[in-house]
Image: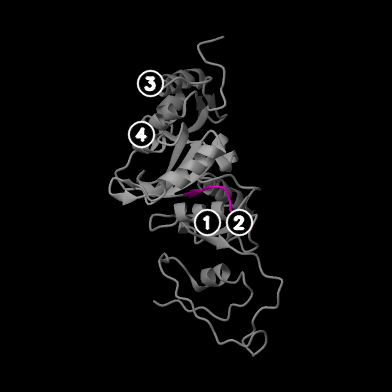
């Protein structure tokens, strides 16, 4: 045995980004030692950090979830940024995880871990944060080591108060009868992205799109090159991804995507159901949004009559 312990089933992986150019210029071995020394200030690693070929990112595995959470809170800017890796055990075992909403702004990881430990041993708490401000978005996922403890958390802690707000605790696993897959669409990119190749846009979106859970396949680009479609294992995961990435600070527009229905669509000439026109108000659009963007975003039901952008 080395100084690293044998990996246990509760290890938690973290991702390291935003490494300084100065550190990168010193080469792989020195970079490895620097990252390792900083990370181990928060707790014991299961193995040495794994550095990417371009030296710009790395991953590391902590022996305990609490130490990984400490690293996430400690390293937000310098000397690098740390976030929980989305491919950890909790993301794969949804029966062991609960969704937690309505979290007060000032609540910390430690307080959440202590609160949910009332029902059993907590593996990890993934508090979803804004990538720009690093402030949490008011919701996250608490992961346990078995389904029984997760069920107890829903039964006993839903509606309980933490720092003046009543938490909403519900199963992370999809309910019976719910759609087996879920998809999202992303459009309305910043102007500077217009000159990018599809592969470059995909790379920029890759980390964001897996902030809540893994994609079932690589995202696909629409024929126009203006919209990306991504699919998840269930509808709830897609829905929570939209919630996590929406907002005024987002670089793009994001919404749930529903594939075109095979049923005959309503027709404005009196065909179909014969119902009157239905008009939707769409708000929170970026200044760069065009009518073409709106038509592309809302054409998935094959029944769009027209769009009108108020200026």
**Mark 2 residue element:** strand
What residue does disc 4 label?
A: 110
What residue does disc 2 label?
A: 182
Rounded to the nearest whole Å, what is the CA distance between mark 4 and mark 3?
17 Å
Quadrant of the rendering where the N terminus is positioned: top right
**Disc with the residue nearer the chain's start (4 vs 3):** 3
Rounded to the nearest whole Å, what is the CA distance between mark 2 and mark 1?
8 Å
Looking at the rendered image, the disc whose residue lies closer to the viewer, 2 or 3, is 2
**Residue occupying image coordinates x 61% and y 49%:** 199
Horizontal arrangement in the rendering, residue 43 relative to residue 196 (left or right): left
**Disc with the residue nearer the chain's start (2 vs 1):** 2
- Marks 2 and 3: CB-CB under 8 Å? no
Rounded to the nearest whole Å, what is the CA distance between mark 2 and mark 3?
40 Å
Horizontal arrangement in the rendering, residue 130 relative to residue 193 (left or right): left
Rounded to the nearest whole Å, what is the CA distance between mark 4 and mark 1?
27 Å
**Mark 1 residue element:** helix
Residues shaded magenta: 170-177
**Disc with the residue nearer the chain's start (2 vs 3):** 3
Q: How many marks?
A: 4
- Residue 171 forms part of the magenta stretch: yes
Nearest the viewer among 305 and 227 is 305
- Marks 2 and 1: CB-CB under 8 Å? yes
**Disc with the residue nearer the chain's start (4 vs 2):** 4
Quadrant of the rendering where the C terminus is positioned: bottom left
The label number, if any, that marks residue 239 in the structure image: 1
**Mark 3 residue element:** loop
Q: Is residue 76 visible?
A: no
* Residue 55 against residue 128 in the figure, above or below: above
């Amino acid at each position: 045995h080395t100084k690293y312990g044998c990996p246990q089933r509760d290890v938690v992986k973290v991702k390291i980004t935003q490494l300084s150019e100065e550190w990168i210029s010193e080469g792989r071995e020195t970079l490895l030692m620097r990252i390792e020394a900083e990370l181990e200030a928060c707790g014991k690693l299961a193995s040495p950090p794994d550095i990417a070929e371009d030296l710009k990112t790395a991953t590391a595995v902590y022996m305990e979830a609490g130490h990984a959470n400490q690293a996430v809170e400690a390293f937000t800017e310098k000397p690098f940024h740390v976030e929980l890796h989305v491919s950890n055990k909790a993301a794969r075992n949804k029966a062991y995880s609960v969704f937690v909403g309505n979290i007060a702004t000032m609540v910390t990881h430690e307080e959440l871990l202590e609160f949910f430990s009332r029902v059993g041993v907590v593996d990890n708490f993934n508090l979803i944060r804004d990538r720009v401000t690093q402030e949490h978005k008011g919701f996250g996922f608490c992961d346990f080591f078995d389904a029984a403890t997760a069920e107890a958390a829903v039964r006993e802690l839903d509606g309980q108060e933490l720092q003046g707000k009543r938490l909403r605790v519900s199963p992370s696993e999809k309910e019976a009868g719910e759609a087996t897959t879920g998809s999202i669409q992303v459009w309305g990119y910043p102007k500077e992205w217009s000159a990018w190749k599809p592969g470059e846009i995909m790379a920029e979106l890759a980390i964001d799109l897996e902030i809540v859970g893994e994609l079932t396949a690589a995202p696909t680009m629409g024929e126009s090159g203006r919209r990306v479609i991504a699919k998840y294992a269930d509808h709830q995961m897609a829905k929570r991804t939209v919630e996590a990435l929406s907002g005024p600070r987002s670089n793009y527009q994001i919404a749930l995507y529903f594939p075109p229905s095979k049923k005959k669509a309503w027709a404005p000439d009196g065909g179909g159901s014969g119902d009157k026109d239905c008009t939707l108000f769409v708000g929170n659009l970026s200044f760069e949004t065009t009518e073409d963007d709106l038509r592309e975003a809302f054409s998935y039901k094959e029944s769009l009559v027209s769009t009108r952008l108020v200026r």
